[in-house]
Image (cartoon, helix red, strand yellow):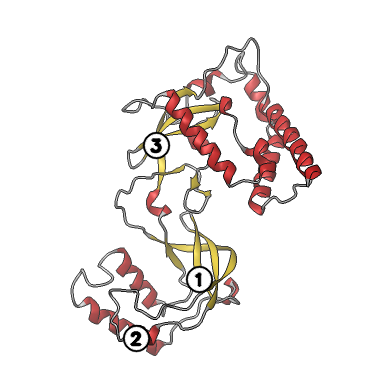
């Protein structure tokens, strides 16, 4: 099947969903052995972290409005060819209230009531890439510092051009006589790398020279220059714990970089996901997003539903290609 115009990320989503359709047969057998509606009693009633959470769920009409807004946003960022395949139907969504380790509670959805919230992966909303399994993004700013994590994988990169620096000093903390000496007067191209950190989070803005590759390793300052830098920082830090960078995570990072002769690119990065991504703890069932009629018999299996989605998506692709 050809998907004209689909982006690389859309194609990866398609391959993932197609493999799910190929892999569910064994699990469907287990599900059908459980109860009359196609779900085993143990899966429908119990989960590893099921619990009653404080507070109350939002009214169903508010949840439905929010879900429709999410779907509209998803469609705006997706190739229309893939809508029928990847956009979830409202009548398949089951509501959960999920508590994270920061004690915040938010509502999420699963495809049916036999999947639990910690079985799926949630997105980092800043870069639209998945968080590690079992983590969810908490939108609340708890003031937690962003820890530095080592880079364990250099995934890919893109080249961008940056204009010259402005003539007027844009930084209040920089001395006026210093800016003319450090200002870049010409446009510059840099490579921006997407990397994976030891915590499993992704980061997308590691700057390098255009021709740099991970196998080249970082460039380092000379021993002499490294000693000079250490002395410069120690003079600054003599001003106390509040001197830049302040005592704590940032100053510890600078010390590690000085110990390694200031490698460039830096082998560790600080990222918001490390402060906002929280481990899922307990969760509570809410119910179906839309009311469901009682089934007289077992409904379609997951494999049958996915195969039907693939057929609809293929028909839509052929229709769009014919119009092109």
Whole-angstrom CA distance, mark 2 to mark 1, is: 25 Å
**Left or right, residue 158 beside residue 202:** right
Name of the residue lying farthest toward the bottom:
224
**Left or right, residue 264 beside residue 238:** right
Q: Name the residue beneath numbered marker 3.
A: 281
* Disc 1 residue crowd, few under 14, some 14–19, many 20+, Cα 10 Å: many
| Residue positioned 64% across, 45% down in the render | 13
Q: Name the residue beneath numbered marker 1.
A: 207
Q: For this rendering, which residue is in front, 228 or 65?
A: 65
Image coordinates of residue 183 in percent, x first then y, are: 41, 82
Determine which of the numbered discs, if any, sits on residue 235 in the image: none
* Disc 2 residue crowd, few under 14, some 14–19, many 20+, Cα 10 Å: some
Q: Is 298 placed above or below 323 here?
A: above
* Residue 60 picture quarter: top left
Whole-angstrom CA distance, mark 3 to mark 2, is: 47 Å
Visible residue check, residue 182: yes
Determine which of the numbered discs, if any, sits on residue 227 in the image: 2
Find out whether the residues at labels 2 and 1 contact each other: C-beta distance under 8 Å.
Answer: no
Counting the numbered discs, the total is 3
| Front position among marks 3 and 1 | 1
Find out whether the residues at labels 3 and 1 contact each other: C-beta distance under 8 Å.
Answer: no
Visible residue check, residue 1: no
In primary-sequence order, the first of circles 3 and 1 is 1
Image coordinates of residue 75 in percent, x first then y, are: 59, 41
**Left or right, residue 16 beside residue 171:** right
Q: Is 246 placed above or below 132 here?
A: below
Q: Secondary structure at mark 2?
A: helix
Whole-angstrom CA distance, mark 3 to mark 1, is: 36 Å
Image coordinates of residue 117 in percent, x first then y, are: 48, 34
């Amino acid at each position: 099947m050809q998907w004209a115009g689909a982006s690389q990320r859309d194609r990866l989503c398609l391959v993932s969903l197609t493999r799910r359709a190929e892999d569910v047969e064994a699990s469907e057998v287990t599900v059908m052995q459980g109860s009359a509606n196609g779900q085993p009693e143990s899966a429908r009633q119990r989960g590893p972290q099921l619990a009653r959470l404080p507070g109350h769920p939002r009214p169903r009409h508010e949840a439905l409005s929010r879900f429709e807004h999410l779907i509209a946003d998803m469609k705006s960022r997706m190739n229309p060819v893939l809508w029928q395949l990847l956009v979830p139907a409202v009548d398949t969504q089951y509501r959960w209230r999920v508590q994270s380790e920061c004690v915040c509670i938010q509502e999420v959805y699963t495809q049916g009531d036999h999947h639990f919230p910690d079985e799926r992966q949630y997105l980092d909303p800043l870069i639209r890439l998945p968080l590690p399994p079992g983590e969810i993004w908490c939108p609340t700013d708890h003031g937690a510092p962003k820890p530095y994590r080592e880079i364990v994988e250099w995934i890919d990169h893109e080249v961008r051009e940056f204009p010259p620096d402005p003539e007027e000093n844009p930084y209040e903390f920089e001395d006026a006589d210093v800016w003319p000496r450090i200002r870049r007067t010409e446009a510059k191209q840099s490579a921006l790398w997407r990397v994976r950190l030891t915590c499993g989070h992704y980061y997308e803005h590691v700057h390098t020279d255009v021709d740099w590759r991970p196998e080249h390793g970082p460039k380092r300052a000379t021993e002499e220059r490294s000693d000079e830098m250490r002395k410069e920082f120690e003079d600054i830090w003599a001003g106390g714990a509040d001197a830049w960078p302040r005592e704590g995570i940032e100053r510890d990072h600078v010390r590690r970089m000085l110990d390694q002769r200031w490698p460039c690119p830096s082998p560790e990065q600080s990222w918001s996901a490390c402060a906002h991504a929280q481990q899922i703890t307990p969760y509570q069932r809410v119910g179906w997003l839309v009311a469901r009629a009682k089934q007289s018999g077992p409904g379609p299996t997951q494999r049958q539903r996915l195969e039907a989605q693939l057929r609809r998506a293929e028909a839509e692709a052929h229709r769009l290609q014919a119009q092109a």
